[in-house]
Image (cartoon, helix red, strand yellow):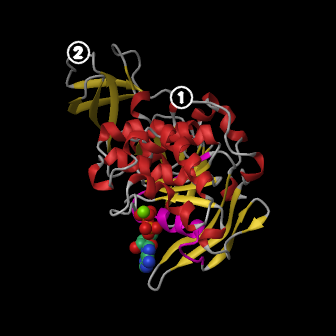
Amino acid sequence: MIRTQRTFPADTTGADLRLSGLCKTFATSTALHDINVTLPQGQFSVLLGPSGCGKSTLLRLIAGLENPTSGKIHLGDARIDQLPPKARNLSMVFQSYALFPHLDVAENILFGLSVRGTPKADRAARLHKVAAMMGLSDLLARKPAALSGGQQQRVALARAVISERPVCLMDEPLSNLDAKLRAEMRVEIRALQQRLGLTMVYVTHDQVEAMTMADRIVVMHAGRIEQVASPRDLYAQPATMFVAGFIGTPPMNLIPRNALPGLDAPANATTIGIRPEDVTPLESGAGPQVTARVMAVEYLGADQLVTLAIEGATLLLRLTGRAGALPATLDLRLPQLALHFFDAAGHRLPSPSDLSHPQAQEHDNDQYA
Ligand SMILES: Nc1ncnc2c1ncn2[C@@H]1O[C@H](COP(=O)(O)OP(=O)(O)O)[C@@H](O)[C@H]1O
Ligand SMILES: [Mg+2]
């Protein structure tokens, strides 16, 4: 990953982006309920959640493209939610790239600077620096129609970068690219954010993008924040059953407690969670906790996913692809340290797995503050 000195002068690096009590109601529905979160300066924050959960609405509130129904947005000490978009000191990259088809690459990249009346010599110097950084130097005279999807994406990024604004907002910027290019651009965008010290707010519904790019993930569901945590903490200690069932490919098994009567669990636990990679098949009858029937095997090369039936539930197990043919039934161990417990409201209870990941306890969960 590219790590060089930050190129912004210190006085333009902005500050934390603080959202407090943000609500947004449209004519017939409420898209956001009481959003409270701080997105730290210089960090890569991802808004993650299923389609319709309010990610784009939240980003548009930050950008000033929509007004909140109530609540405040601060950038450092400055309240920005009443400022027009162009006074907010941020740049935005859209899913559609929003390039002008009749302008060439150079004109597209420079568009915002020209509108703001940046002196011509300054514009030329910045264009050449940014074009070199983004690998666009040989394409400056082309029209967008003569570029590949990945090149168009880079032009859209270059336009955000050249603004030298400390906060960058991106709404599903990679969703029009094929899988290979998406993987490459993930790395490029992350490197760019680190190199420039940008405060990034990046929207995606793709948990792999979120896990690979983010310093901090804000998981959203139905207009509310479910959890704010680093990718590792989110995976190790999902705060709710929604997060447990959303993160991970495939996600955590969530099993009714009464289907696993032999396990040690808190009295108010109604659901027991265990990740597919934590379910361990036993060699031979050494005190199995659960005996399961093999229902289906999906071979994926490095891994194979085994669907198992136990009394009252199904259980997904991830095995290495090298494991041989499986018998019709498997004796399983569900290691106590890998168990997650949830109450009837879907909230995490103190769980044995917390012991193997204690540092997450210290992280701020400022949505609960
Ligand atoms: N301009 C609008 N008018 C009415 N409803 C809207 C508008 N924009 C978004 N919504 C609604 O708000 C909810 C959240 O939408 P959105 O923020 O686009 O979700 P996401 O980006 O997570 O897919 C959805 O139910 C959507 O239909
Ligand atoms: Mg959206």
Residue at figure coordinates x 51%, y 67% from the top left: 223
Specify the amino acid type for callout 1.
Met
Which residue range is magenta in the image? 44-68
Residue at figure coordinates x 32%, y 55% from the top left: 143
38 in relation to 289, above or below:
below
Residue at figure coordinates x 25%, y 28% from the top left: 300
The x, y position of residue 331, in whole percent, is: 33, 23
Instruction: Using the image as rendered, state which of residue 38 and residue 331 is in the foreground.
Output: 38
The x, y position of residue 209, in whole percent, is: 44, 43
Magenta stretch encompasses residue 258: no
286 in relation to 354, above or below:
above
Specify the amino acid type for callout 2.
Gly
Displayed quadrant of residue 298: top left
Mark 1 vs mark 2, CA separation in Å: 38 Å
Number of numbered tags placed on the structure image:
2
- Relative placement, left or right, of 360 versus 208 is right
User: Are circles 1 and 2 on residues that touch, CB within 8 Å?
Assistant: no
Pointer 2 residue: 324
